[in-house]
Image (cartoon, helix red, strand yellow):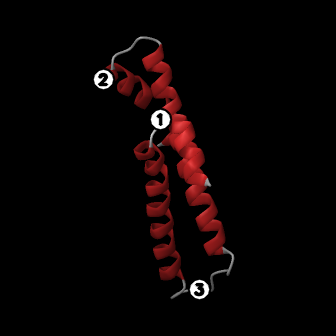
């Protein structure tokens, strides 16, 4: 269901896969950190659920934010290079 909605919003399958890929990388990285923490302290059983929800949710949200800003610049008449630069200076600062 999520992938279908992302394809509808982003307009292409490749663009829709990017936030999912970023989310998966974030989830795997955080799970590795959680695994390391279990060597030193107890970790809640809910940490995995929270990690998955936040990783996927933030990846999709930030991707929508960046793509929307980029498309606004293109609609305003900017060329691709200028649109990327403006997007990274404005929305990119928020995401990073």
58 up-or-down from 80: above or below: below
Residue at image position (67%, 81%) is 45
Residue at image position (46%, 75%) is 32
Crowd class of label 1 (few under 14; some 14 to 19; many from 20; radius 10 Å): few
Residue at image position (65%, 67%) is 50
Residue 94 appears in the figure: no
Mark in the foreground, 3 or 2: 2
Quadrant of the rendering where the N terminus is positioned: bottom right
Mark in the foreground, 3 or 1: 1
User: Seen from this angle, which residue lies furthest bottom?
Assistant: 39
Camera-nearest residue between 64 and 35: 64
- Whole-angstrom CA distance, mark 3 to mark 2, is 48 Å
User: Seen from this angle, which residue lies furthest left?
Assistant: 81
Camera-nearest residue between 18 and 58: 18
Residue underneath mark 3: 41
Q: Secondary structure at mark 1?
A: helix
50 up-or-down from 32: above or below: above
- Whole-angstrom CA distance, mark 3 to mark 1, is 35 Å
Horizontal side of 23 relative to 77 (left or right) equals: right
Image location of residue 87, percent across then percent down: 44, 27
Residue 44 appears in the figure: yes
Q: Earlier in the sequence, mark 3 or mark 2?
A: 3
Image location of residue 44, percent across then percent down: 67, 80
Residue underneath mark 2: 81
Q: Secondary structure at mark 3?
A: loop
Image location of residue 36, percent across then percent down: 47, 81
- Where, by quadrant of the figure, is residue 8 drawn? top right
Q: Earlier in the sequence, mark 3 or mark 1?
A: 3
69 up-or-down from 42: above or below: above
Residue at image position (44%, 45%) is 13
Residue underneath mark 1: 93
68 up-or-down from 62: above or below: above
């Amino acid at each position: 269901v999520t992938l279908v909605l992302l394809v509808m919003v982003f307009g292409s399958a490749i663009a829709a896969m990017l936030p999912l890929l970023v989310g998966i990388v974030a989830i795997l990285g955080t799970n590795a950190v959680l695994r390391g923490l279990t060597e030193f302290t107890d970790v809640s059983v809910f940490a995995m659920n929270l990690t998955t929800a936040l990783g996927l949710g933030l990846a999709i949200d930030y991707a929508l934010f960046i793509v929307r800003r980029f498309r606004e610049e293109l609609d305003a008449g900017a060329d691709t290079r200028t649109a990327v630069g403006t997007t990274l200076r404005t929305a990119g600062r928020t995401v990073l």
